[in-house]
Amino acid sequence: MSLTTGPQQSAAIPLDPTADRSAQGRFVDRMSQWPWWLLIIVFFGVLIVWNAMTSELYSAIFSRLLLGIGVTIFTTLVAYSLAIIIGLIAGLGRVSQNPIIFNIATLYVQVIRGVPILVQLLVIAFVIVPIVIDGINLLGSALAPILGGDNFLTRTKPQDVPFLTRSIIALAIAYGGFQAETFRAGIQSISKGQMEAARSLGMSYLQAMRYIILPQAIRRVLPPLGNDFIAMLKDSSLVSVLGVRDITQEARLYASASFRFLETYTSLAFLYLTMTIVLSLGVKWLENRLNSEGRAQG
Amino acid sequence: MIVIKHLVKQFGSLRAVDDVSLTVGRGKVTVIIGPSGSGKSTVLRCINHLETPTSGEIWVDGIHLTHDAKNINAVRAEVGMVFQQFNLFPHLTVLENVTLAQRVVRKRSEAEAREIAMQQLTRVGIPEKANAYPSQLSGGQQQRVAIARALAMNPKIMLFDEPTSALDPEMIKEVLDVMLELARSGMTMVVVTHEMGFARNAADEIVFMDRGRIVEQNTPEEFFTNPREERARAFLNQILR
Ligand SMILES: Nc1ncnc2c1ncn2[C@@H]1O[C@H](COP(=O)(O)OP(=O)(O)OP(=O)(O)O)[C@@H](O)[C@H]1O
Ligand SMILES: [Mg+2]
C-alpha cells in the first residue's frame, strides 16, 4: 500500500572506483535511476491542473470536489488520531500477561481483521452506534429518579448522531485493530533484556513500558504508522457510502447529475493521488531520518 | 543478606533448579560456578524474581519474596543486577540510563539523581562518557555503565550474571577491577562467572552447581586447591587447563 520513490539516486554511482564506464554508459545508468513514474504522474498532474484552470468543466469539477476536501481531511485526521490511541491500548493488551486483557484485545483484533472495512463501517454506523446510544438512554431512564427524567444520558437519541461522527468512530475502530498489531510487533521487537533491566531496577511493568519499551518500539513503527495514515486517507472515501460529503461523495453527486463520469472520476483519482504521493514522500523522509538517527544511537 | 530455602524452578519437564538452599551473609561475596545449563542464572534471576520460583522460599534483607507485587518491587529496588548483555537503554544517554530509575523509582530530583549518577560514573571510571549513547561505547565501558546504573539505586545487594562473558579479552580486566573494588567496599554480591582469578581473589565462598543442584560449597582456598567433589574437580580441570 505504500508508494515508494524507487531506487535512491545517490552519489555512490559516480564515486564508485570500479565503475570504469563510458560517459554514455553512465548516462544510461543515470537515466534508469530516475523515478520516471513520478515524472509521468507530474506530467498528467500538470495537464489536469492546466485543464482545471483553462477548461470551464474541469474548474467546475475541482471547485465542487474541493467542497469535500475539508471533510476528507478532518475525517482522516480525527479517525487516525483516535485509531492511534485505540491501537496503542489494544497493542499493549496483545502483549499483556493478564489473560483477560489479552483475550479482549485479541478478540477485537481478530474481528477487525476478519471483516471487510466497508462492512465494519455499515455495522458500526447502523448497528453498534444505535445500540450503544440506546443503552446509554436506558441507563439514563434507569437513573431518572436521581438525575431527573430528562438528563444528559437520555437527551441524545440515535438519530441525533451525525453520520460524519459515525464514520469517524467506525474508521477509528477499524484502523485501531490494524495498528494494535503494528504496536504489538514493535513492542515484541525490543529485546527481552530491556524489560528485565528496567524491572531489575525496580520499575513497575507500566513504568518500564512507558520509559523503556514504548519509546524504542514507537520509533521503530513510525514508518508503518505513516503508511497507515496514507491508507486511512484513501479509506476515508468509504464514508461516502453513508452519504458523508467528502470529496468522493461530492464527485459521485456531481457525476451523476452532469453525466461527466470520465472527467469527474479522473479528477477525483488525481486528487487522492496527489495527496498520497506527497504523504508517502514524507514517510520516506521520516524513514531516512530515523535510519540515520538509529545509526547514531544504535 | 539473602536466604534461599529449598528453591525449585521447573521449566516444563526440566528442573533447572532442584532444591537449592543458600545463605549469603551481609557484605559477603558468593561466586557461583558450574557448567552451562546447571541453573546458575536461574538461581540469580529467582533472587530478584525475574523468574518466579516453582517452590521454595527466598528472603532478601528480611523481606519475604512472595507473588505480592509490592514485595517484589521493594526487593528489586534493593538488589542491583548486571547482565551478560549489558542491557543498557539504547535510546537514552549514559547519564539518562543512570538517572532514570533513580527518578521514577526512588523519586529523586533531577539534580540529585544527576549528582549520584556522576559519582557512580566516576567510580567506574567513565564520567566523561555521560552524554554519549551506549552504542558509542566499547563493551567494557557499556558494562561499567550498567554497573553504575545499578549502584546509583544504592542497592544492598548486587547480582552479576556472567558480566564479562560478552567482552573482548582486553576489556575483561576493567570490569573485573570495578567488581573487585566493589567487593572490597563491603557490598554483598552474588556473582556467576567463569573468571577463576576473580573468584579466588574476591569470593568469600564458592558455590559449585551441576544439573540444578549445589554440589559443593567451599572457601576459595579449599575449593581451588582441594575440591571435595569429583564433579567439581573435573570442571576445574577443564576450565583451568
Ligand atoms: N525461560 C526458560 N524456558 C525454558 N527453559 C529454560 C529457561 N531459562 C533457562 N532454561 C533452562 O534451564 C536450564 C538452566 O538454565 P540457566 O540459564 O540457569 O543455566 P546456567 O547455569 O546459567 O547456564 P549458562 O552457563 O549457559 O548461562 C537450562 O537447561 C536452560 O535451557
Ligand atoms: Mg547463565
Image (cartoon, helix red, strand yellow):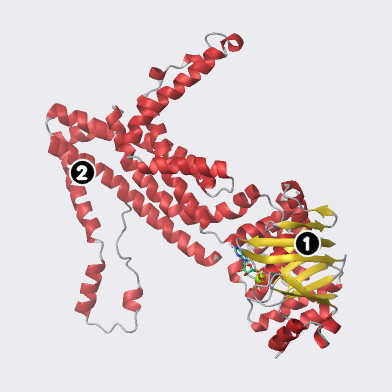
Disc number placed over residue A49 in the picture, else none? 2
Rendering coords of residue B91 (x, y %): 58, 60
Task: Look at mark 1 in the image and give the residue it sits on.
Answer: B6
The crowding category of the residue bearing disc 2, from other C-alpha atoms within 10 Å (few below 14, some 14 to 19, many at least 20), is some
Disc 2 marks a residue whose amino acid type is Val
Rendering coords of residue B68 (x, y %): 73, 47
Residue at figure coordinates x 87%, y 67% from the top left: B27
Answer yes or no: is residue B109 visible. no
The crowding category of the residue bearing disc 1, from other C-alpha atoms within 10 Å (few below 14, some 14 to 19, many at least 20), is some
| Among the 4 quarters of the image, the one containing residue A192 | bottom right
Residue at figure coordinates x 56%, y 44% from the top left: A99
Splitting the image into four quadrants, where does ligand 1 fall? bottom right
Q: Secondary structure at mark 2?
A: helix
Report in which chain the residue with disc 2 lies.
A
B150 shown above or below A274: below
Q: Are marks 2 and 1 on the same chain?
A: no
